[in-house]
Structure formats: structure tokens, C-alpha cells
Amino acid sequence: MGDLLQGYRGEARAVLERAGVAVWDNVDLRTDEGTFSGLLLPRSETADDRHVVLKLANGYNLGIRASRVRELVSHGPREVHARPPRREVAVDASRPSVTLLGTGGTIASRLDYRTGGVVPAFSPEDLYASVPELAETCNLKTRALYSVLSENMGPEQWIGLAVAVAEEIRGGAEGIVIGHGTDTMQHTASVLSFMLQNPPVPIVMVGSQRSSDRPSSDAALNLIHATRAAALSDIAEVTVCMFGPTSDEYGLLHRGTRVRKMHTSYRSTFRTIADIPLAAVFSDRVLPLRTDYCPRRLDRTVTLDAVWSDRATIVYYYPAMREDIIDALVDHGYQGIVIAGTGLGHTGRSLLPALKRAVDRGVHVFMTAQTLWGYVQMHVYDTGRDLMDIGVMPANMLPEVAYMKLGWVLAHTTERSEVSRLMQTCLAHEITQREPHDGYLVLQGGLPDVDRYIKQHRI
Amino acid sequence: MGDLLQGYRGEARAVLERAGVAVWDNVDLRTDEGTFSGLLLPRSETADDRHVVLKLANGYNLGIRASRVRELVSHGPREVHARPPRREVAVDASRPSVTLLGTGGTIASRLDYRTGGVVPAFSPEDLYASVPELAETCNLKTRALYSVLSENMGPEQWIGLAVAVAEEIRGGAEGIVIGHGTDTMQHTASVLSFMLQNPPVPIVMVGSQRSSDRPSSDAALNLIHATRAAALSDIAEVTVCMFGPTSDEYGLLHRGTRVRKMHTSYRSTFRTIADIPLAAVFSDRVLPLRTDYCPRRLDRTVTLDAVWSDRATIVYYYPAMREDIIDALVDHGYQGIVIAGTGLGHTGRSLLPALKRAVDRGVHVFMTAQTLWGYVQMHVYDTGRDLMDIGVMPANMLPEVAYMKLGWVLAHTTERSEVSRLMQTCLAHEITQREPHDGYLVLQGGLPDVDRYIKQHRI
């Protein structure tokens, strides 16, 4: 049976012991703020010792400070569902081989909540048992690289991931799927777009907004769509495959340098910004929405350029920003600053002396737009021209993408003309050259190709 | 005739003198990068002396470094249109009285380009002459308070504006319109929402994305809609009235604490985030889309609370953010930090020690969501709970609004419980309690009430 209070320590464990409850019990927990009913979850080894965590009926987890628990009553253990039998699937030489790399996040939580463990069991057989559709598409190989929440992903993981992807491609993988938490999926997608250049096969990142024990989970469907895109699509770029905008009829494939998480909670949180998505992914087909992607190749070559400098930062401009914000960054040795400016790429005039000091001390300063949509145009107003005169350079990409690219560039060079040249050279479709008329906040009902396909096939 | 090279000095003036051209001439200007044709614009007294500025046929201004001009040929002066005759309009006691306060920005540029001056002539008679529709709605009074680009608006202007609005309301104005540049209109709108509490009449901010000398200008229509909303609507809040999403059929009235500029260039740039707009404004009617607004009153009382502290800042979180970013802010005396976090309100675990040091030294740290849509929920994951444990507090509002509110709050108190109480008390509809299903990226075709109205009236 193991530990009845798995993962609980200290203060939290004492409260649970006094109440005589066990993990996976259905409990009522009373606090001064109200009574909560749910399943008592086990905790990980690294969790704090102050919280009791319940899974509520709506599927969300709720952490309650142990010191606030007034009463705790168990209604006995939940019904135990047997672990689905591992499903052995013979290798079928006619199907493409796909490697699924695990990094952690909610997509891994299908097994998480079943075993109570932090590192999910992550074999092809487990996945085939949970999501049988995967076996129809490809021969799956799995590698659990990390098990971290995506907000804790950093240079070590980005570089390790890029190396692993290159290894798998060189070893014969015909598509790569990367399971990743959604919080910083866009950051990892964009840095991989620079670290892995000219890949011959699709590299598809996927996650889920709701864990698979919730009725509305997007975990299985996203995984099916991502695996299909990796195995069968012709789009050999780093992409993100997540839930479509309106229903569970299709997933959308977003370019890694163009995608952004736009809602804290919805399943359709990922959106292509200032452009349309690359493709819609149905259970039976990948429908390209653009034609300008890099096509799949048969060779096994990919340029691995996995380096990182932690000397870049983002300044999110706001009116009345004081000069000491910029001065402090220079004093702390930052070599690159991405400004998310207002309008066409502006800051207030009062920031100019500090920005000039920064540039004069060798800091590379790039301007992006905090509107997210549109493009920086620093020639239009005096403010933009004055900023360029002191050496601030336009970077027509999302602020987050400019940061990831600048961190990567500064690991290659800090020479001004070369930093400028690399930042202003489009390496992975990151630079907005022009924005299509349907690229602005019109995704809802704005994909006529997809609507037509659904209508024709009566999905 | 005045100065033929009005506003030009130094290097730029020398180039123009050599070529024998004058402002308002149609010129061809050759550089090594290409030849540009357009109208030679006059410059303001405060402009730099290095650029020659052309208005291109597409309506945009282009600044060209004087040192890059290889050849400059004049095709003679543009056709001169006579200034529209000032139109005297008698006061009609049956119409409401509205005060239009000017601060600068593109909306003022109608007169800007005509006179070549920086401070536009800004009398009711001039406005009536340019936009005759205004006279049908109200008796207009105008006050030019400032003439600054909106990125240079700051505490002095915000406080001056709030004081002027209160004076006008107390003096009998039945509606206020504020002309403002679009870059930071959302910031001014949110700070005015806190500085001017419980106003009895509408306070409507308006700007334009394209100056009125461009065929696609939104200046006149936005001004008509804003004036109508100020004069006739029942919505006594600080709002932004700008171009609707698809056409020039209507404007949208956005709550001042809910609105954000979402496109660098489009006219429909302003969007209500995580909610629907307050109203659609047609030329003949204001159509409310919500019912929970503060209604117009007949009294003349408004609580003026115009204070500001410059000790707040925004930290836009990105993965691999180093602790020295937070430490530097604390060392420089910042008393309030608004984090724009990932997902439901997270930062990487590595930032926790620095955030704890900040809180321990009395800095007030609030968490917002960089997804913009959705709401911070720090109870769901360990990361959020750990952040709350060290004293980071959720602030369920747009990052920019949290910054403007915190700057205002810190001018009242730095006592922790009081700062926390004020930040978490909804003062001007700024806190997201819940998000309607149609509040997320669905504005296009997502306003059935408006569509129905247009259909019924065959607009």
C-alpha cells in the first residue's frame, strides 16, 4: 500500500494524521473561509510542508494552508480504477517513427495523478494504452528528459532538449514531439527555432491546459494531433500544436516564433500573432493554411547551435518610467535590452538619456511593440527617429521572441554590427514582414479553409 | 508667407536651402536607398535639426537624415485649400454642454498639418467647421491643456487633466471628451478612473490612429462618436471611444480600466480585454452592451483624488530571469512591483529568494498575467502557492492597470495591509471577477446585439 500520506511532511502531515485520512480519500475540509470537498492528493517529494492539496470536483487542484484547517473528515477512498493494461504494439515498418520527448507539465499529468508520482511512467506501451489512436499513426519512441514545470525551464533544459532532438533526428526519427508545460512553451519553441536550424522533419511541441483526469481535458486530443503533425505533416519547422479556437474538432499548428499564450485558462489559449497558423490538424488529416513553410526532407542533417547567454533582458515600457531602470540594468552587466514599447515602437522622451548611456556603454537595445499585433515603425514619428539616432534598433518580432533570440545571439557575439545583423536577419520566420488582413484577432470564424473542410466532411 | 523652411534648423535647413525648396512643396528626394516623393512638411520648434520630413502619398510621414539626401527637386507648392471658414454656432439651450480637453496626439493633427503649427487652433468654431456633426449633438467648449505626444504624458499631465475634468464637471459640463494620443491612452484612462471617483457624467477619451489628412483617417468619426457618448450616453465612467472592429459603422466604448491598444497601426486597435465593451456608438444612438455601468447623475459632485507616486514598476517575467533584476529594483527604492507572470500567475522558482527579500524589505509585489486574457489563480499550482507564501499578492487586472493603480495607491499609503486592501478592492471595475464566454478574442463577429442593430437599421 505504501505511505498513506505520500509526500506530506511537517505541519501538513500532522494535520492529516490527526484527522486519520489518507491520500486518494474523498474528504470534506472546513476552514474559516468555507468548506471544500475533494480528493486528497499525494504530494511530490519537493513540495512544501505547509499545504494540503485537494482535487475539487471541477478538476482544479486547491492548496490549503494546514494552519487554516479547522475540520477534516474522510468519506473513504475513491473508487480505484485499475491502471489500463500496457498495450504492446508491434512495430509496423510502414509507419513513420516518431520520438516523444518529455519535459513535464500538465500533459504528463495523465499518469501523474494515477500513480501519485511526479515523474510519470512514460513508455510507448503506457501511452498506447491511454491514447490508442497514437498507435495508428506511428511507431513511437519515448524519452523522459526532464520533469519540470514549464516556468522552471531554463538554459540547461533548452540546450539539453535541442541536443536530444538533434540526436533523435540523426538517429532516424521522422518526427519529434515534445511534451512541455504551457506557461513557457512559446519561449522554448522560439529558442529551439534558433538552436535547431534547418531541420529535415517536424518538431512539434504540445501540452495541455487541463489534466487528463478532468472531463474537459485537452491532453489526449492535443497529443493525437501533435503526433499526427510530427509523423505525417510536411512542415519541417519547430511548431506548437494545441487546441483550436472553438471546439475539439481540430488542433492548430503554430509557428514556434509566432505563437503566444493568450489566456490563463482556456484550452484554446495558444494563438498565432500577427499571422495565421501554419495548419489545422484533424484526426485524419493535416490541412496546411500557408504554403511558405520549410518542407520535410529525407536527409538526416540538422544544424545544432545550442548556446545561451543570460545577459539579455526585457523592459516593458510604461509611462513615467524612470531612467534608473535602464541604468540599473547596465550597471548589472546586461548586454542586451529588448524594450516592449508603446505604439509603433516608442518610449517617453525622458528615457532617452539613459538609453543613450546604455548604447554608449555597448549595450544592444532593440525595440518591439507591446501591442503584440502590428509592426514596429520607428521612422514615422520624431520619437522613433530620435530613438534610432541614439542607437536603438527595431526588432519586428514578439517581445518574448526578441528576448530568446537576443540571448542566443549574445552567446555568439557581442560585436555591435554582428548583433545587429543577426537580430535583423530572419532566421526562423520570426520577423514580421507584413501582416495578413486576417492575422489580427479574427481567428474566431476567421479560418474559411477550415470551415469549408469541416462542412465538406461533416465533422 | 512666413518662413519658407518653417521649423528647420542646422543641417536639415542647409540641405533644403541649397535645393531651393519650401515647406508644402511636392518634392522628389533621392537617397542611396531609393527616391521618395511627397509633401515637404514643416517641423515643430522642438524637433531635431537632422531630419527632413516628407508626407508620403500613403499618408505616412517619413523622416530622412539630411546627410543622406543626394538630390532634392521641387515640383512646386501643393494646391492650397483654403482654411474652412470658422463656423459660428449659436448656443442651443436644449443641447447638453460638453467640454473637450486637448492633450495632443494624432487627433489634434487635423489642424496640425494645415497650419504647420504644433499647438493646433482648437476653438469650437474650428471644430464645428471641420466636423459639422458635432454641432448637432452638444454645445461645445474647448480647453487645450497640453500638446504632447502620448508617450510623454506623465504624472504632471495626469494630475492636471484630473483637476481640469473635476473643474469642468463642477462648472456644469454634462459630458467630458479628452483628446489624447493613442500610445498611452489606456494608461491615462486607467489612472483617471482612480483619480476621478464616482463622476456624475461620462468622461470619454478619444484619439485617432491616422491623421485627418489621410483618406482613411478615423479622426472625425472617432470625435463624433466620443462627443455623442459624452453628451448623450448614460454611462458616467471614464471610457475610451475608438473605431469599431470591422468598419466605420460604429465606435466602441471601452471601460478605462479594461482597454488595451492591441495593434500598432490598425484603426480598430483598442479592445476591451477579458470582457465585452460597454457600448457601441452609432451616429444616431449609443447602444449599451452591458447593464452594470455607473449611470449618469444630475448632481455636480466628483471625488478628485489626484496623487501619484513614482515608486511602482512592472517586471515582465521571462524564463531564466535572474534575481539581480528584482534586487536592483529594491536597491533603487522601488516600493511596488507588478509582475506580469506566466500562466495563472507564475515566475520561475529561482526568482523566489529575491522576491522574498523584496517583500521582507517592505516592497509590495503583485502578480498579474501576461496572457492578458483570463485571471490570476495562484492557488492551483505549487508555484503560485509558494509565491503567495512569501507575500506575493494576486492582482486580477491588466498589468498596465495594476501599475497605474499601484502608483496611485502608493501615494496614499505604504502600509502593507492598506496597500493590499486597496489593490484588492475593485474601485473602477478594474478587477476581473469572471470573464464572459465572449470576452476572449472573439470581437470579430462576436457582438450579436450590434449586428442585429445594423441589420434592422440597414446601416
Image (cartoon, coloured by chain):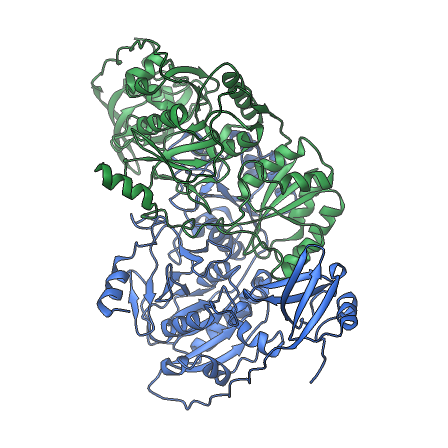
Chain colours: A blue, B green
Q: Can you see residue A302?
A: no
In the image, is residue A141 above or below residue B181?
A: below
Q: Quadrant of residue B427?
A: top right
A104 with respect to A29 (left or right): left
Q: Quadrant of the C terminus of chain A?
A: bottom left
With respect to residue A152, does A374 lie above or below? above
* Residue appearing at x 38%, y 59% in the figure: A245
State whether residue A135 appears in this view: yes
Q: Where residue B397 sits in the image (x, y, percent)? A: 55, 44
Foreground residue, B267 or B412? B412
Name the side, left or right, on which A63 lies relative to A220: right
Residue A31 location in percent, x, y?
A: 71, 59
Q: Position of residue A100 (x, y in %)?
A: 47, 76
Numbered marks: total: 0
Find residue A11 and report its horizontal and vertical position in percent: 78, 65
Q: Quadrant of residue B365?
A: top right
Q: Which residue appears at 37% of the width and 12% of the height?
A: B93
Residue in the image at 39% along x and 52% along y = A273
Say above or below: A267 vs B118: below
Q: Nearer the viewer, residue B423 or A394?
A: B423
Residue A57 placement, left or right of B245: right
Quarter of the image where one finds residue B136 = top left
Q: For this rendering, which residue is in front, A420 or A39?
A: A39
Quadrant in which the N terminus of chain A is drawn: bottom right
Relative to B327, is A195 above or below?
Answer: below
